[in-house]
Image (tube, helix red, strand yellow):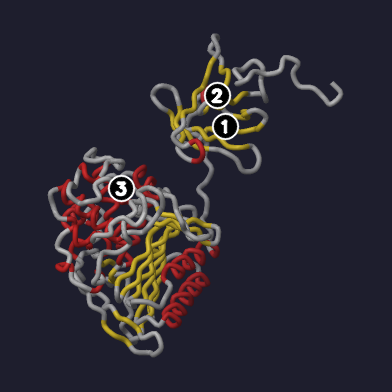
Amino acid sequence: MTYSSEELLPGTQRALLHRIASAQAEGRTPSLVAAVQRQGRIVWNGSRSCVDGHAPDSDTQFRIGSLTKTFTAVLVLRLRDEGLLDLDDPLEKHLPGTGIGGVTVLQLLGHSAGLSAESPAPWWERTPGTLRPGLADVLGEQTRMHPPGRRHHYSNPGYSVLGALIEAVRGASWAEVLQREILEPLGMRRTSTWPQAPHAGGWAVHPWADAMLPEPAEDLGLMAPAGQLWSTTADLLRFAAFLVEGDDRVLGAASVEEMRAPSAPSKFGPGEGAYGLGLQVVQKSGRTLLGHTGSLPGFLATLWFSIEDDVAVVVLTNATSGPLVGTIAADLVEIVAEAEPRIPEPWRPLPEADPELLALTGPWYWGTHPNVLRLTADRGLELGPLRGDGRGARFVAQPDGTWTGLDGYYAGETLRVVRDVDGRVSHLDLGSFVFTREPYDPASAVPGGVDAEGWRGLGA
């Protein structure tokens, strides 16, 4: 057993240690390592092992399985940001001859292309990639399980196709592009396509006896972009910080934010979440967790981060099954977030106050429904209901004087400030909805007009 901490309170440290110790014992896994990050810094490491004196640490590699998909998605978004493809492009435009050319890049990223979940037998995770030398061998004959774009259906072969797309556009292997464009810029020196010492060995634990069997570690070939990588808790927390803030050397903040948004209709059960672009989105104990789970024979992995709580957690184990690493990682986030809530940044006034923008703030009415328009610290606008739940959004200014919705019901919609002939603000036009300073203001362009007799009581 090992653990260390720089900032967390002793009670929080013990709760974290107790959770992973229970997970290793109850899950019957040879070893388990976990780490917690806040404010971009690792604040806790912990591990348990069945062999005294041989507990893994933050530099020990484990296989991370489908966490690899997030890296592949970042590479595809880089191609989009460079103008080399569009997410709505059909696959055929860049990678002809696959037999699934009509599906889009976006559908592949969000697992809504309708492709099969697995490649044809034999089980790709326990057999060498040389058995599947071409995409036809990966996709098989029954490629379409559902109509494209209709629902989320997780597809490992879909990410193999995305790897081939990256290679076709870049003219280099997926592994080379990954190393050059993500791992080196982010300083992830302990993440690789093949294990580098020190690394854990993968084991299967007998379900009804305390006995173990070594698992093979195959080179997955064309399936590598779906699950090949090995990494450490330290490297994966570095990757988590990137997925929160972005890094212009790899992918800007707007694009990583795009990855975090649900991308496809989901058929998940209650509380199971959704899928963005290479990122899972789950709800646990009232908080949103983003990241990815991963598994390959002999290994289980999870990376979860909560932007609201400023907590990221990685859990890695070397067992085929047993510990529920997704739940364990979510529990570690909750322990820290509940025991040591994030300290808010101090309130500070704006560096300058624009009189024209200030004049737009305050109450506005959509019909009789009161809303409030606020000026944000980044010189944006935020519209929301005065009371309770309702439609709202943040808006960013455009060069032509309009505003574009960034999220919520009005994402992508245009907000216009409409002025009268004297230049005074008459009303706001938001996607054809008219917002006035008074409810059903007769002086404004209210659709359908306003009764000339105005407001009245019951006896009128």
Q: Is residue 272 above or below residue 17?
A: above
- Secondary structure category for the residue under label 3: loop
Q: Where is residue 202 in the image (x, y as percent from the top left)?
A: 28, 78
Q: Residues within 10 Å of mark 3 (few under 14, many from 20)?
A: some
Q: Disc 2 vs disc 1: Cβ atoms closer than 8 Å?
A: yes
- 173 left or right of 326 in image: left
Q: Residue 345 vs residue 90: left or right?
A: right
In this figure, which residue is indicated by the disc labeled 2? 428
Query: On screen, 126 above or below 365?
Result: below
Q: Along the horizontal axis of the image, is 68 left or right of 98?
A: right
Work out how far the residue at label 2 is from the one at label 1, CA to CA, in angstroms. Answer: 11 Å
Side (left or right) of 111 relative to 339: left
Q: Say few, some or many: other residues with alpha carbon within 10 Å of mark 2 (under 14 / 14 to 19 / 20 or more).
A: many
Looking at the picture, which amino acid does disc 3 mark?
Asp
**Distance Cα–Cα, label 3 vs label 2:** 36 Å
Q: Which mark is residue 247?
A: 3
Q: How many labels does the image show?
A: 3
Q: Which mark is residue 373?
A: 1
Q: In which quarter of the image is the N terminus?
A: bottom left
Q: Determine the CA span between mark 1 and mark 3.
A: 31 Å
Q: Earlier in the sequence, mark 1 or mark 3?
A: 3
| Nearest to viewer (mark 2 / mark 1) | 2
Residue 187 image position (x, y, % from top left): 24, 57
Q: Earlier in the sequence, mark 3 or mark 2?
A: 3
Residue situated furthest left in the rendering: 171
Q: Is residue 292 visible?
A: yes
Q: In which quarter of the image is the C terminus?
A: top right
